[in-house]
Image (cartoon, rainbow, N blue to C red):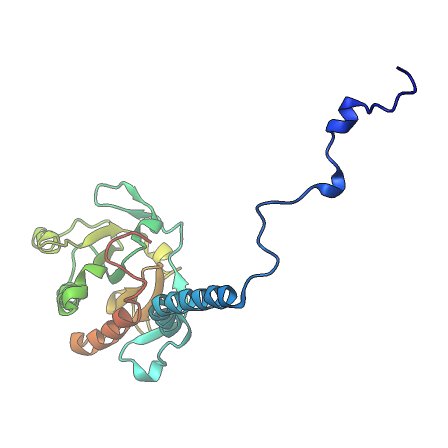
Amino acid sequence: MSGSNSSDPVAAAAPDPLAMKVHGGPAPHLPADVRQRRTGGRFTALLVLLACAAPVIVSYFTYYVWRPSARNNYADLVQPTRGIPEGLGLRDLEGRPVASASLRGQWLLVVVAGGQCDRRCEDHLYAQRQLREMAGRERDRIDRVWLVVDEAPLRAPIEQAVAAGDAPAMVLRVQREALERWLLPAPGQTLEDHLYLVDPMGEWMMRAPAALDPKLFHKDLDRLLRASAFWDRPGREH
């Protein structure tokens, strides 16, 4: 009947907005012991995280921030370091192009010489192999590279020597003019007079003296390998 006191069934079914409750959120007030346990747990997790990260942080700081001064090194420290150019024009011995970025991921001991490889070149290739072996268990973090700056064919005995062993040297051709945009000799020297050290990021960072003493240069290399041990691993995974 019109005018009756019976209510509308739809209106009766609608929830009262003032009576709605929010479920699933955190309790507005936690007991003190629960809050203390949560805070303690977070603090413990933070300490564990810092303990795990500390060696990496110290290693990174030692290698990139607190670098040894040139006075403490046998070799010349390159400051600032010089990244490997993308357009270096590297080629393998068959003439196929090789990307500059493919050299990143390992420490590189670099020899520069012509394909005929004179006595100075032979000495550097021998020292290069010797230095890698002197690194002991860290030697798998080091690659040997010979950059050939002319089109002369490699002498057969030299080619066989650099290809021997469980870790053959990478032999790549490059134009001297292009290489000089990256590596530089000491004043009064030529590119072929030095052994060069490149870090896993592709940064040239050290140049051995022309009169190379492998034992003294090994001390520099060993310090760098130890400083980078927590972030650098063998193989090109970077």
- Give the percent coordinates (x, y) of residue 74: 26, 80
Residue at image location 33% in from the left, 46% down from the top? 99
Note whether 107 is above or below 209 in the view shown.
above
Residue at image location 24% in from the left, 45% down from the top? 92
- Give the percent coordinates (x, y) of residue 151: 24, 49
Residue at image location 26% in from the left, 50% down from the top? 173
Q: Quadrant of residue 197?
A: bottom left
Is there any visible trace of residue 8 in the rendered image?
A: yes
Is there any visible trace of residue 209 in the rendered image?
A: no
Please state if 157 lies on the left or on the right of 102 as rendered.
Answer: left
Q: Residue furthest bottom?
A: 71
Please state if 84 lies on the left or on the right of 213 as rendered.
Answer: right
Residue at image location 36% in from the left, 74% down from the top? 62
Please state if 218 lies on the left or on the right of 60 as rendered.
Answer: left
Q: Quadrant of the N terminus?
A: top right
Camera-side residue of 54 and 41: 41
Q: Quadrant of the C terminus?
A: bottom left
- Give the percent coordinates (x, y) of residue 14: 74, 30
Q: Quadrant of residue 40?
A: bottom left
Note whether 92 is above or below 44 in the view shown.
above
- Give the percent coordinates (x, y) of residue 43: 45, 68
Q: Quadrant of residue 230?
A: bottom left
Looking at the rendered structure, the number of numbered marks drawn on it comes to: 0
